[in-house]
């Protein structure tokens, strides 16, 4: 593994910023010796840690975090990045020093590895450590990261708790941008919990702030959320209007992932109207946009809905191929809520094909996946289908 001096300078600057205001003033508020960094990057991690042990603990931890960030940002090497962080954490614990910064970077690494349960566990520690160490900026970042990760994992109750606490801190510190983002995130969670009036209220709070601060990207997100809310209220015309407006704002801000979401949700509206050709067209656009944004989970959920649309058209062979692809992609991205949905849909497909044994297998998989993320109400619905099938 080599790194050019130009690459080294870029990596040092990037590591100070990664992943977007990552650290409060602390270990990373440190000017490294570039020659030392260059030397350490040529050495095995174990040997570097031995050398770092000869430095004062604060300096040793600072170098370990800097090296971890470079390994993550420049080389995408999560294993070595984690080794450096664990060395830094061990050193901090030995000397009874602050650990919230180190834990936060460990959470970033876990997220990069798609280890969402591990990331959530670490972020709980980040929040506790940031409170103990009186690090309000890091506390807000930790709660935001926790809310987002728990949402991705499908633990919506935990996500809502994190965002609710974060909202209080945003108001206390008058952080308008983060308050707007958190209202939006809270609305997303309420929507997933089928608390539609609360979701609409949160979205409208967020829209007011985003308009006030002239944030088009945030406005796009909120219009998309309102589209989902109107769809849940069976107001399909308002839903379609909001999705189209949102998609235009996402295009203005070069947000491919957002455009993917809007087309995905438009497809659901067309499904309800039994306009399957229009639904498939929107899903193909969504898949293109998610591919442009390199979203494995996005492509996975799109394949899930393509499979569902094929089922509605009674094109079962095509449906099975799409569901299988969705199952693989959602497993890879550890998106358990969507994975459970896909497994349930495969069970339905097997029932329609009179393949009872296979249906049982997939319903049982879906139940276990829902239980993993504590969505017991969803698991109960699938259990009822399974029980009827076994009679």
Image (cartoon, rainbow, N blue to C red):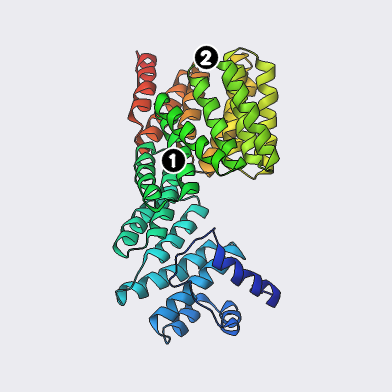
Report the residue marked by disc 2.
352
Please tell me how crowded label 1 is: few (under 14), some (14-19), or many (20+) other residues with Cα within 10 Å.
many
Q: Quadrant of the C terminus?
A: top left
Q: Is residue 311 visible?
A: no
> Relative to 156, does residue 147 appear above or below in the rendering?
below
Residue 276 is labelled as none
Q: Nearer the viewer, residue 380 or 294?
A: 294
Q: Which residue is pictured at 62% across the width and 38% down the height? A: 258
Left or right of 357, for residue 290: right
Mark 1: which secondary structure?
helix
User: Which mark's residue is nearer the viewer, 2 or 1?
Assistant: 1
Report the residue marked by disc 1.
151
Q: Is residue 92 visible?
A: yes
- Report how many numbered discs are placed on residues in the image: 2
Which residue reaches farthest bottom?
Answer: 54
The CA distance from mark 2 to mark 1 is 32 Å
Tell me which corner region of the image, top left, top right, bottom left or bottom right, holds residue 319: top right
**Mark 2 or 1 closer to N-term?**
1
Please tell me how crowded label 2 is: few (under 14), some (14-19), or many (20+) other residues with Cα within 10 Å.
some
Q: Position of residue 27 (x, y in %)?
A: 44, 73
Q: Which residue is pictured at 49% across the width and 24% down the height? A: 229
Mark 2: which secondary structure?
helix
Tell me which corner region of the image, top left, top right, bottom left or bottom right, holds residue 288: top right
Tell me which corner region of the image, top left, top right, bottom left or bottom right, holds residue 371: top left
Which residue reaches farthest front?
Answer: 212
Q: Position of residue 184 (x, y in %)?
A: 48, 38
Q: Position of residue 261 (x, y in %)?
A: 60, 33
Q: Which residue is pictured at 59% across the width and 83% down the height? A: 39
Q: Quadrant of the N terminus?
A: bottom right
Q: Which residue is pictured at 48% across the width and 73% down the height? A: 29
Q: Position of residue 354 (x, y in %)?
A: 50, 14
């Amino acid at each position: 593994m080599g790194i050019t001096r130009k690459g080294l300078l870029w990596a040092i600057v990037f590591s100070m910023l990664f992943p977007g205001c990552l650290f409060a003033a602390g270990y990373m508020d440190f000017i490294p010796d570039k020659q030392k960094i260059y030397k350490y990057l040529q050495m095995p991690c174990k040997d570097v840690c031995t050398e770092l042990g000869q430095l004062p603990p604060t300096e040793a931890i600072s170098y370990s975090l800097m090296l971890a960030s470079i390994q993550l940002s420049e080389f995408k090497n999560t294993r070595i990045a984690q080794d450096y962080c664990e060395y830094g954490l061990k050193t901090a614990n030995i000397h009874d020093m602050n650990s919230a910064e180190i834990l936060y970077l460990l959470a970033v690494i876990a997220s990069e590895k798609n280890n969402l349960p591990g990331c959530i566990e670490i972020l709980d520690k980040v929040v506790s450590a940031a409170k103990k160490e009186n690090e309000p900026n890091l506390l807000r970042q930790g709660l935001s990261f926790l809310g987002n990760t728990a949402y991705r994992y499908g633990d919506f109750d935990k996500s809502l708790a994190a965002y609710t606490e974060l909202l209080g801190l945003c108001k206390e510190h008058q952080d308008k941008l983060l308050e707007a983002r958190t209202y939006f995130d809270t609305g997303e969670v309420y929507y997933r919990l089928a608390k539609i009036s609360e979701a609409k209220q949160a979205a409208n709070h967020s829209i007011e702030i985003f308009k006030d601060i002239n944030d088009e990207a945030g406005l796009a997100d909120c219009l998309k959320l309102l589209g989902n809310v109107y769809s849940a209220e069976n107001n399909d015309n308002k839903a379609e209007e909001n999705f189209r407006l949102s998609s235009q704002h996402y295009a203005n801000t070069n947000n491919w992932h957002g455009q993917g979401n809007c087309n995905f949700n438009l497809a659901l509206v067309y499904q309800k109207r039994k306009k399957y050709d229009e639904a498939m067209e929107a899903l193909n656009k969504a898949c293109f946009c998610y591919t442009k944004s390199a979203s494995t989970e996005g492509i996975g959920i799109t394949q899930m809905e393509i499979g569902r649309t094929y089922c509605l058209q009674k094109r079962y062979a095509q449906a099975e191929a799409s569901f299988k692809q969705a199952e693989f992609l959602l497993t890879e991205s550890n998106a358990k809520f969507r994975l459970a949905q896909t497994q349930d849909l495969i069970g339905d497909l097997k029932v329609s094909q009179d393949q009872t044994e296979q249906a049982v297998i997939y319903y049982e998989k879906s139940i276990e996946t829902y239980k993993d993320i504590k969505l017991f109400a969803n698991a109960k619905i699938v259990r009822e289908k399974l029980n009827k099938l076994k009679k």
